[in-house]
Amino acid sequence: MPKKTIGRLDKVDFPTLDLFDIDVKIDTGAFTSSMHCHKVIEEDNLLKCLFFDKEHQNYNKKIIVFKNYTTTKVKSSNGMVQNRYMVKTSVLLFNKKYKIDLTLSTRSEMKYPILIGRKFLSKKFIVDINLKNLSYKQKEINQKTQN
């Protein structure tokens, strides 16, 4: 199956999380993918996550509950190792649904609430750093032709 070209930035949907047109940065320097989560509470074998960030209006202020989650160690760009929660969900790119593992972190100081890393990109995508919003543009074209 040929690899799809993706740009350095895009807007994607996470339909099972009810999050749409979320800004993502494609980060070939990161191994794992990471999602900004304002607050995480673990109770009664459930992970409750608040997706809120005043800088990113498409975060819908809902609490999303994950029944299945794990923890993993992630080394940040500055070499610090953190224990993070990891959840499985799906992401819609180029009108195709993909499974994705996301670590949850506080990215409120970052411009993009989600980083998509090499583990997800591998064998599916080629990154062209000169392009952006390729999946989002395709989504807009499809929406116009359906109306």
Image (spheres, helix red, strand yellow):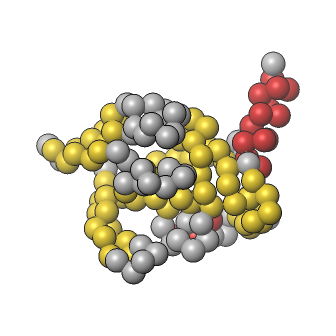
Residue depicted at x 41% and y 73%: 76
Residue 66 in sight here? no
Q: Quadrant of the C terminus?
A: top right
Residue found at the very far right of the displayed protein: 145
Picture quarter containing residue 145? top right
Q: Residue 138's spot in the image, x, y percent? A: 79, 41
Picture quarter containing residue 129? bottom right
Picture quarter containing residue 62? top left
23 relative to 85 in the view: left or right: right
55 relative to 87 in the view: left or right: right
Residue depicted at x 57% and y 74%: 29
Q: Quadrant of the N terminus?
A: bottom right
Looking at the image, is 125 positioned above or below residue 100?
Answer: below
Residue depicted at x 59% and y 46%: 23
Q: Residue 44's spot in the image, x, y percent? A: 14, 43
Q: Residue 96's spot in the image, x, y percent? A: 67, 46
Q: Residue 60's spot in the image, x, y percent? A: 45, 31
140 relative to 107 in the view: left or right: right
> In this view of the protein, which residue sits in the foreground, 99 or 129?
129
127 relative to 40 in the view: left or right: right
